[in-house]
Image (cartoon, grey):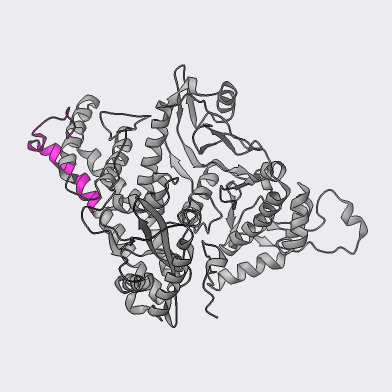
Amino acid sequence: MAPDQPSGVSSDPHIERHATVLHDSFVDFHQRFLDISRRASERFLQRDWEAHQADAQERLDLHKQFVNVAVKECRSALPDDDHEARRCWIATRGRYVELIAPRLDFELAETFYNSVTRRLFDIVGLDSELEFLWLGPTALPVDDATGGEYTIYPIKTSTADTMRTVIGDCPLADHFENADRDAQGVADRLDEYLRSRWDDVESIEMLRSVFYRNKGAYLVGRVRWLNRVSPLVIPLLSDESGVRVDAVILTEWDASRLFGYTRSYFHVLCRRPAAVAGFIKSLLPVKPLAELYTSIGYSQHGKTNLFRALYRHMDHSNTRFERARGVRGMVMAVFTLPSFDVVFKLIKDRFPPSKHTTPEEVKRRYKLVFDHDRVGRLVDAQQFENLSFQRDRFDEELLDELRTDCERSVTITDDEVILHHVYTERRLYPLDLYLREMSRDRARAAAIDYGNAVKDLAAANIFPGDLFPKNFGVTRHGSVVFYDYDELTLLSEVNFRDIPVSDNYEDDLYDQPWFPVAPNDVFPEEFRTFLRSPKIIAEVIDSRHDDICTAAFWNDMKDQHEAGELPDYFPYPAEIRFNRD
């Protein structure tokens, strides 16, 4: 309990009621969350991918649902007087601490409390009296004291024997098509990888829970020798013959992409999420903790970690917010703190006539991205409300833009800047700049992957709307992803057409089309016209991706989705997959 908390708060029935409502709402939320996650195993074995997608959708909205219920119950019983309400809630926090202290997921319980509190009291910025706001160092479990999250397998005889034990202990062990073959295959890859890097291997440590996402399942672990660890992630597939190992992920680089911010969230059963996040952090030391919590499904606590990391960084830096690199947006004002690897995006008050959308539609599209399978090609965006910063941390030119274009979303006073509704995304290298500034080889690789990104989005039932390279970015892994969502839509909402051929030559000379065009009509042939700059994009489109400039390509994708066909996505390189043919 914090030292300034009153003692004996549980004797007040109103305080006890508030704390109990908060505690019970959180417990119910997390139990529902785990119940949905538990279904992933059955979905994987039965290859019921549509049901798994429905589960993922249901799970995404759980936190908000339970927070809203708790807010409603607590608000009805809070004193009307603001001072008394604060006094009551400060005492409630003390009692709540007592209730959650024995739990193994108390950090999630703190986030749940903060979500309720910020809504109840309309908090702007930070409120250290009402919220859990520790911005100093925090300890992740180095070892799981409960013994519940991972198992240590000493290598006593051979790597292959150890891997047989690992697979035999896996919750899916009874469903493997050929466990001995797969154990030997993993061991061979592991031995070959480590032979030239390490003198010896001490043990293999594996998280006990299986990680499920889309059509794949993953065994997540690490190899240890002295104080060294290296990732050991084993992707699994399920087909008519059973479960089989599809690849072995052994590098930090490939494992980082697996847990990246352009992927949907895993379904993982864990009693102590901090231990799982800490285990993964040992494999991916560069990966922010916020992304690790988010990757295992706890997106709200991921937001909490990002929030704390941002304010902690503000206390230990003196850089100023400034406009982000790249072409200025017509719908969003985008800015960044140069020393913090995140961009901030505010919806502008007014859009030019060429943008046939509204602020409400933009919010809907960001929600669509949050709900949708991002297949490694859409950046996860976190929505925040009422963030407050000191005014002198903002570049004056940026303040002028925010004051002029974003009056509804921002308040600027003499001392502070309050962002009322803002999205955050990981900062990327704008593709249009990347193509101009990087070497020819890197630029060509990015241009090729740009075409792959468009095709992957189409396979995921997404039409970006605006295909200009300025709306795409390049990750540190060299992957091209889409991050401008103001015109994004589902393929089913678009009518892809060929441009009609006219019998009259003069028809082609008119400024406007001579044929009728509906608002949702798109003519892919026109993509060739505006995808000519920079030159390397035109070259790659013509030589590698000319099909995206045809209505047939897009309509074929639409037909596949209408038929319920879900494509395969492998978030790891094709060359590390086992060839079972």
What is the x, y in percent for residue 3?
16, 29
Which of 122/542 is in front? Answer: 542
Q: Main secondary structure of the magenta part?
A: helix
- Displayed quadrant of residue 84: top left
Query: Looking at the figure, which quarter contains the N terminus?
Result: top left
State left or right for residue 235 relative to residue 29: right
Is residue 147 placed above or below 127 in the rendered structure?
below
Looking at the image, the residue that sits furthest to the top is: 414
Question: Is residue 519 visible in the rendered structure shown here?
Answer: no
Is residue 101 placed above or below 216 in the rendered structure?
above
Question: Is residue 191 visible in the rendered structure shown here?
Answer: yes
- Displayed quadrant of residue 231: bottom left
Residue at 47% x, 23% y is: 318
Residue at 87% x, 55% y is: 508
Q: What stretch is highlighted in magenta?
A: 1-27
State left or right for residue 109 relative to residue 564: left
What is the x, y in percent for residue 519?
67, 54
